[in-house]
Amino acid sequence: MCAKKRIKYEEIFENEIRQENNSEMQEAFHSNAPAQIDSEQVVKGKVTSVSREEITVDIGFKSEGRIPCEEFFGSDPDFNIKVGDEIDVFVESLNPGSGGLRLSRAKAVILNAWERIEKAYNDSSVIQAKITGVIRGGLNASIDGVNAFMPASQSGGDYSNLDEMVGQSFGVKIIEFKGEKKDLVISRKAASEEERLKKRVELLPKLKEGALFTGRVKNIMDYGIFVDIGGMDGFVHVGDLSWARIKTPKEIITPGQDIHVMVLSYDREKEKLSLGVKQTQKNPWDNVAVKYKAGEKVKGKVVSLMDYGAFVEIEPGVEGMIHVSELSWTGKIRKPSQLLKIGDMVEAVVLEVDKEKQRIALGLKQVGPNPWDELKKKYPEGTRVKGSIKNITDFGIFINIGEEFDGLVKIGDISWDAKEKEPLKGYNIGQNIEAVVLDVDAVRQRLSLGIKQLSEDPWKEISRRYPNGRIVEGKVTRTADFGVFVELEPGIEGLIHISELSDEKIKKIGHDMFKAGQTVSSLVKNIDLKNRKISLSIKEANKKEERDNVENFVKQQGDVKLSLGDLLKNKLKEGK
């Protein structure tokens, strides 16, 4: 087995090939050599033996040549040569006077390489080169042992990461070739562009919506990534990278990464290719309606906070929203940030699933018992409670009864007197006050209170004190186009409609007909307890008074049997 030692190619070429001057010996030697073999040429040979120091090669000459093992290591560092292999060798000499047949593996490799290089240059074809190091302005490369220079601008990559190319092999094109000086300038960029153009021609017919490709990430931006699918670059918007919420592509993508993409659209005129990554994966929303049912509890991570609610990721690509109104039973939370922060793990209850709109409504407060249910049990209707005035508005008074529960006393529930001009007068924020529970609405989370209910409703006795048909006296408080208002007692008013003032039709109530404070008699026609209205009538009162007078007259006649008709006739006669 050959012992592995390395030599430099330059040392081989420093020693030029010299021929022996002894012409007689040279002629004698050549006379015995095969006609097709000549010195200073590359020929095929077969390995006949391999030792630690040298390799013996038969080229069809009358003798075999020996080549030091180090030449093979120098030209083929990873070679694994064995007896019977056919290899190219360079014939240095056929002159027996200079040591017999002399062969060189290294020179054969170099000469073959230059031949391929020259052909690649003339044909403008691609040839493989291995990057050996970074130098000023570019890279050193080797093409089968021949040194070449690749400018940084021709590397086809990131200038700042040239070190990453060392040790790698690439297809290149020869852009400068000076054979006599052995100067080579190569370009990976030119080879890549040529290869890319070929792939592009093959790729164009395949660019149809829904087509799948495997590409390599070339560039990452905040708004998306550029992917080379072989012959063309496409753009993947950040929204088409993942079904899950991501802020930047860098969270899930790295430069140079191979990924599967789907063609979303291709504009041939603008050569604009839109790709998607998430479209190659199953949409998690397809099974949402099956996996999540209303009333079930789920766990997730808070991924976004808005003024109107918090978004919770319950699985990659599936988010639910907790509306601000569903954060607390008391309604004291005005913004989700008061209770939650991004990254929090929370448990919530599914309220509603809308697969079409891809929305899941979640509730945080529903995880625990509804305190409003407990409040309803604790304070049934009619319960007296104490609290402090939290706020006063045009429509009522808010009273805090403790445990963050506020109840509302509406304007109409402050006083029994509906004509109270300033019902809020005398009430101040912070004032301790007593009220009565009117209703606890656990569904709408509302507590209704009343102040006037602390005392008996005076209208409850109205029907008893003022039954229909009774003639009552009252004082005129005011007049209107439609009638006269009469106060029967403090806080209790009745209305005499204009049609009930007289048997005669009155079109308009004159200023001199009724005066404030004037006492009038009227008959109670009807009492509307629900709307707290009493209908009075002077016309009916007069009629009743006449009937009562007739009845009294009849009673005064004793046993005399007179009919009402007879009495009327008598009255008529008296009148005449």
Image: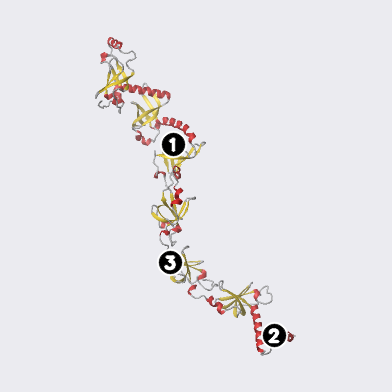
Tell me the distance, in whole angstroms, between the alpha carbons under discs 2 and 3.
Answer: 70 Å
Q: In this picture, is 337 found above or below 403?
A: above
Q: Position of residue 403 (x, y in %)?
A: 41, 65
- Residue at image position (67%, 87%) is 554
- Label 3: which secondary element: helix
Tell me the kind of residue under disc 1: Ile
Q: Nearer the viewer, residue 331 or 380?
A: 380
Which scheme is used to colour this image of the protein? Answer: secondary structure
Say which of marks 1 and 2 sits in front: 2
Q: Quadrant of residue 336?
A: bottom left
Q: Quadrant of residue 147?
A: top left
Check the picture and name the quadrant holding the C terminus. Answer: bottom right
Relative side of 208 to 82, left or right: right
Q: Position of residue 178 (x, y in %)?
A: 38, 23
Q: In this picture, is 535 found above or below 55?
A: below
Q: In this picture, is 541 found above or below 342?
A: below
Residue occupied by mark 3: 375
- Label 2: which secondary element: loop
Between disc 1 and disc 2, whose residue precedes?
Answer: 1
Q: Which mark is residue 500?
A: none
Circle 1 Cα neighbour tier, 10 Å, few/some/many (<14 / 14–19 / ≥20): many
- Label 1: which secondary element: loop
Tell me the kind of residue under disc 3: Leu
Q: Position of residue 30 (x, y in %)?
A: 30, 12
Residue occupied by mark 2: 563
Q: In this picture, is 309 found above or below 173?
A: below
Tell me the kind of residue under disc 2: Ser
Relative side of 491 to 183, left or right: right
Tell me the distance, in whole angstroms, between the alpha carbons under discs 1 and 3.
Answer: 65 Å
Between disc 1 and disc 3, whose residue precedes?
Answer: 1
Q: Quadrant of residue 125?
A: top left
Residue occupied by mark 1: 229
